[in-house]
Image: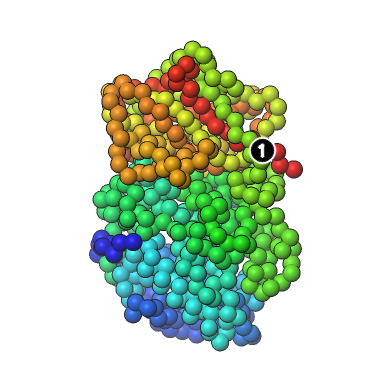
Amino acid sequence: MTDAVQLRFRSPLNSPEFRGARPRAYSRTVENGMIIERDVEVPTRFGYVIYCDIFRPADEKPAPPLIAWTPYGKHDPSPLAKIYPDSGVLAEWMSDYTIFEAPDPLYWTARGYAVITADIPGAWYASTQARYCDPQEAEAYYDLIEWAGVQPWSSGKVGLSGVSYLTVMQWRVAELNPPHLAAINPWEGWTDTYRELTYHGGIPETFFWPYIQVRWGASDHPVEDLWRETREHPFFDAFWESKAARLDRIKVPAFIIASWSDHGLHTRGTLEGFKKISSERKWLEVHGRKKWHWYYEPDAVERQRLFFDHVLKGEDNEFARWPTVRVEVRDGSGSGTFKQATAWPIENTRYKRLYLDAAQRALCDQAPAEPASLSYESLADEPQAVFDHRFTSATELVGHMKLKLHVSAAESDDLDLFVAIQKVAANGEVVGFTHFAIFEGGPVAMGWLRVSHRELDPAASTEFQPVLKHQRLQKVAPGEIVEVDIEILASGTRFEAGESLRLVVKGRDIYKYPKPLLYAHHEDTVNLGLHTIHTGGNFPSYLLIPEVDLP
C-alpha cells in the first residue's frame, strides 16, 4: 500500500456543474412505493462523509440493503439503450431511477430490498480528495456497509451489486470482511489493475485507461492522477499491489458472473476472483454475451434475486440447488449452450499441445522434426502469422490456453506480440463472437506479450496459465531467439468436425474499432522491422488448448 498518491486538480470541463451534477442537498420523498432519501451523509473513520441516495420500501419493513458504490454519479440515470444502442439493453428493462451499471431501485424495493447508491469518496461535489481502487477507498466502503447494517430500516444483512468498477470495489471491500456484509454479486470486474487493464502482457494500454480516469474524475476536489502514476510505475510494484485485490481473504458468499467477451478488461480478473476467494459458498456463471445486456436481462435479474433471497433472506429456493459452475459453450455470437461443472478450471480438463509448423502454416498434433520459420513486418497493419488446425470431430474447448513461442527480431531489442484465437467455419469464413460489451465479430480469445516482460512468476504460474512478474526488463539482442509463454485469456467454444481453430500472431492490435468507441488500444510500441517465429526441431513452439467433456 502507498499513501503517496499523485493528485491533479479538476478542470472546468470535468467539474460537477459542467457534468450535470446537482449540488448536495438532503431530500426525502415517497414515490412509486419507495421512500427515497437523497444526499444522506454517512460518516467514515477518515473524518469525511460518503454521500448516498437510499431507496427503501414504503412499508418500512426491515429490508436487506444492496449497495452500489460508483464513480459515475449517483445522480445520473443511465438510459443504456440510448447511450450504447449496441449494448443489447432494452429500455423497458430498467426504470428511470437506475444509474449506470447499478441495480434498478424500483425492481428491488418492490421485492423487499433497500438499494443504496453511493458516490465514491472525492467524486462530484465531495468532502475529500478522490483515490481509486485502493485500500483507503475500501475502508470507507467498509464504513458504509457497517452503517447500513445497523439502520432501523435494515435487516442487518448487506449485499453488494453492480458491474465493472462497482465490482472492482466489491472485491476490495470484501477482503476486509465487514461483519454486516453477507453477500456479494461481482459482475465482471478486474482484480489486478496492472495485469488486467493497464499493461496487457507488459504492453501499455493507451486509450481506454486514459479515458476512464477522466470519466471517474468529475469533482470539485483534486483527484488521483492515474495516468501520470501509470507512466511513473511501468512495473508491478507497491503502487500496483495497492490496486490489486487480496482475494484469498474474501470469505463472504459470492455469486460471480464472468464472460468470455470482455478480454482486455474483465474476463481474467473475474475468473481469478472465483478461483482464489476463500468463500465456502461461491457460484460462477460465465457467458459469452454483452455484459450490460447480461446484467439487466430479466432472466439474469431473476437469478440475482434468487441468490440474494437465498443468502440474505434465508429462503430455500432453487438457488440452493444451483450448480457451482455454469458456463456457456459458444457456437458463435449470441449462440451457445450453457453447461454445468463443479470447478474452475473445469474438472478433468485435457490439455493438449498443437505444435506450430511454420512451413505448413499449420497447428499439428506432433512437433515437426524439421525447423522452419515465418517472418512478418511488425508495424504493418495487414501482414501477420497465421496457423490453422482443422478438427476431425466435434470438440469443446473451455478454459485457459497458453502459447509457447520461439521468436526473434532482426532489428530491435524488444518485441510486442499480439495473439488472437479465431474459429473458422468449414466454408473458410471466420466466425465472429461478441466482444468488449458492444461489438460483434470478435475473436474466440486474445493474449499479449512485450517480450522484455517475459520473466515468469513460478509460484503463480501453472502449465496452462503463465503469470508474469513484471518487475524488470529482459531485452533481447537483434536476431537472438528467445522462448516466451503467452497467457491467452479463458474462453468457451465448440468446434464441429470440419471447423478450424486459427492462431493469429501480429505486431499490432489485431482487432480495431474506431475512436471514440471504447476499446483497448496499444499504440505505444517497441516494435521495429521483422519479427520471426521459429518452429520445429529445437524450437517446439506450441499452442496448449483445453479440451473438456461436459454433459
To which residue does mark 1 refer?
548
Residue closest to the far front:
459
Residue closest to the far top:
370
Q: Is residue 64 above or below residue 530?
A: below
Side of 35 relative to 517 (left or right): right
> What residue is rendered at 56% in x and 54% in y?
274
> What residue is rendered at 38% in x and 44% in y?
469
Q: Could you say where residue 22 lies in the image, as x and y percent from the top left?
A: 39, 74
Q: Is residue 390 above or below residue 142?
A: above
Side of 373 relative to 302 (left or right): left
Q: Is residue 251 visible?
A: yes
Tag 1: amino acid: Val
Q: Nearer the viewer, residue 373 or 118?
A: 373
Q: Secondary structure at mark 1?
A: strand
Q: Nearer the viewer, residue 300 or 347?
A: 347
Looking at the rendered image, the quarter that the N terminus falls into is bottom left
Q: Could you say where residue 233 lies in the image, as x and y percent from the top left?
A: 28, 50
> What residue is rendered at 58% in x and 76% in y?
157
Q: Is residue 237 above or below residue 523?
A: below
In the picture, residue 161 is in which quadrant? bottom right
Side of 289 relative to 68 (left or right): right
Q: Could you say where residue 229 lies in the image, as x and y percent from the top left?
A: 28, 54
Q: Could you say where residue 252 lies in the image, as x and y percent from the top left?
A: 56, 66
In the picture, residue 458 is in which quadrant? top left
> What residue is rendered at 43% in x and 83% in y?
26
In the picture, residue 125 is in which quadrant? bottom left
